[in-house]
Amino acid sequence: MTLATFLIQCLNAVQYGLLLFLVASGLTLIFGIMGVINLAHGSFYMIGAYMAYALAPWVASTLGGGFFATLAVGLVLAVLLGYVLEWAFFSFLYEREHLQQVLMTYGLILVFEELRSLIVGDDVHGVAPPEMLSGTLPLGELMTYPVYRLFISGVCLALALGMYFVFTRTRLGMMIRAGSTNREMVQSLGIDIKFLYRVVFAAGVAIAVLAGMVAAPVSSVYPGMGSTVLIICFVIVVIGGIGSIRGALVASLLIGLVDTFGKVFVPQAAGVLVYVLMALILLWKPDGLFRAG
Amino acid sequence: MNSAMPRGKLIFVMLAFAALALWPLVTGKFGVDLVTKIMVFAILALSLELLVGSTGLVCFGQAAFFGIGAYATVLLSPQDGPASLAWLLPACVLAAAAYALAVGALSLRTRGVYFIMVTLAFSQMAYYVVHDTPLGGGTDGIYLNAKPALGTLLALDKPLVLYGFTLACLAATFGFLALLLRSRFGHALAGIKANEQRMRATGFSTYPYKLAAFTISGGIAGLAGFLFAVKDGFVNPELLSWHQSGAVLIMIILGGLGHLRGALIGAFAFALLQELFQSEAIFGALAKHWLLGLGLAIIASVALLPRGLVGFSGQLRERLAGAHSDVGTADE
C-alpha cells in the first residue's frame, strides 16, 4: 500500500465515521436523555436519502434552487416530522417498559419502509452531487480525491461542534442535561419537560435526515439502507457508552477505521470485524468506553 | 410465573393443543404446512420467553441458535440417505446449546442494553461465518438431501408426520418449561428478574442460573432450527440474521411477556397477521405492501394493549367492572 492510497483510505474512514456519528448522536441523545430505544432511527436516515432524491426535482421547479435548497427544505420537513412523531407515537411511551418501545418503533420501521415503497418505489437511485462540489483534488501524482467527500466531513464536523456548543454553553443544553438526570426535578422547577423532549427528538430526527441527505450522492439511495445504518449505530452507541456524545464520536471514528481498513486488508471478514470489536470492548469495559455523565 | 396454574389458563392451553391436534382433519395441505411453520416459530418464541419473560435477559441473538440448529441438521445429515432421528436431533440441539453456553459465558458479564448488543454481536458473528465462508454454502444456502427418520413409522418427509412430530415437540417444550419455571430453578430465575441484587444479597450466585437458562434457551432454539430445516429442506444465512432475532422478540412482546402462553399466542398472532395482510383476496393490490398493515397492527397493539394479547382479557374484565385501569385509558 502506497502512502497515497493509505491517505485516501484514512480520509474515507474518517468521512464514513463522521457520517455514522451524525446518525448515532441522535440515537444516543434520544436514548440517553429520553430513555427511548428508537429502532426507527435508521428509517430517518433512509427518509433523508430519499428526500434528497425525490425532493430535488420539486425544489428545482418551485424554488429554482439546487442541492442546498433541497437540503434546507428537507431539514424543515424533518423537524416537523420529528415533532409530530414525538407527539403522536412517543409521548405516551416514556412510562412504559423498554420492550414496548421496541415493539412500537419496530412497527414504525415497517410503516416507513412500506410508505417509502408506495411513494417512491423500490428502485435504487443515484443522486448527483452539487456541481460546485463535484470536482476532485489531486493527491500525490496519480490519485485524486472527490471534493464532495471532504464536504461531508466538513458538514459533520460543523454539526458536531455545534452540538457540543449547544450542550455545554447554552441554557437549552443545560435544561436538556438536567432533564436527562432527573425528569421530575426539572419539571418541578417549572421547565416544560414535554416540550424539551419534543425538541430533542425533533433535533435527533433532523440530524439523521440531514445525514441521509448528505450521504445520498456517495452511497446511492436504496431500500434497505435504514436498517444497515441502524445496527451499526447501535453498535456505536453501545461502544461509546449510552448517552455520551463524546463516546459516540470516538466510537464512530473507530468503527469507520475498522470497517474501511478491514475491507482493504481482510475483505472476507470485513462484515464481522465491527462486531468482534464491539464484543471485545464490551468484555473489557461492560459499560462502554465513556459512561454518560 | 405463578406456582399453581389457575384453572382458566390450564383450560386455555389444553384447548389450544387440542385444536392444534384436530387441525389437520379440517384443513388441506396449505393449512398443515402453515401451522407447522407457526409451531416451529412458537417453539423458538418459547425459548426466548424463558430468557426475556422469565429471567429478564433480553437476548437479541436468538436467531443464531436457531440457525445453528438448522445448519447442523443439514451438515450432519449423510449425503446418501436419511439420517436417524435418534442421534441427529440431539446433536443439533447440543450444537446450538454449546454455542449458547459459550456466548452466554461471555455476554452475561454485561447488563441491560449492553447485554442486548453483545448477544447481537455474537449472532452477527455466526451470521457472517455461514454467509462468507464456504462451510455453509455461502449466501445461496444448502439443501437437505434426505429428511431424517426413525424406523419406517416416523418418516419426517411426510407432511402429516412432520406436523404431528412438531406438535409433540411444541407440547413437550411447553410442558418442560412450565415444569422448569415451577421448580426451585424457575423461582430463582423469577427472583433474578425481579431484583438480581437482592438475590445475590440473599446468597444466590446468580451467574450460573443465568448461564443455565441461556444454554437451555439456546438448545430449545436449536430444536426449532432442526424442525425448520426438516420442514423446508433448505437452509440459508437469513435464518441467522438479526431480522429473525427481532421478529421472535416482537412475537413474544406482542403476545405478552411473563407468560408461556404469551409466546404461543404471539407466534400465532404474528404469523396470522402476516397471512391476513398478504392475502390478495382481502387487500387486493395493497397485499404487496403487507408490511404496512403489519406495522400499523403492531403500533395499534402497543397503544391499546400495554400488557400484550395475553393481558387483553384482564383489561376487558377491568373495564367491564368499571375499575380504573392504570394504563391504556388515555389513548382510546
Image (cartoon, rainbow, N blue to C red):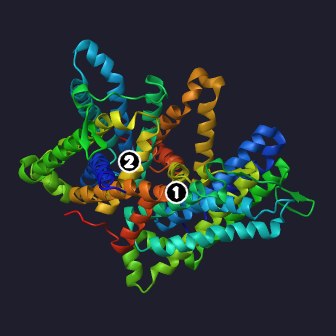
Give the numbered dot on residue B327. Answer: 2
Tell me the kind of residue under disc 1: Gln
Separation of residues labelled 1 and 2 (CA atoms): 50 Å
Residue A51 percent across, percent down from the top left: 33, 28
- Decide which of A292, A268 is in the foreground and name it: A268
Q: Are marks 1 and 2 on the same chain?
A: no
Query: Please, is residue B284 above or below residue B303 in the view?
Result: above
Residue farthest front in this picture: A141
Residue B45 percent across, percent down from the top left: 59, 56
Apparent side of residue A11 relative to residue B218 in the rendered image (left or right): left
Chain hosting mark 1 = A
Give the numbered dot on residue A268. Answer: 1
Which quarter of the figure is the N terminus of chain A placed in?
bottom left
Residue farthest bottom in this picture: B203
Label 2 residue SS: loop
Q: Nearer the viewer, mark 1 or mark 2?
A: 1
Query: Please, is residue B69 above or below residue A143 in the view?
Result: below
Which quarter of the figure is the C terminus of chain A placed in?
bottom left
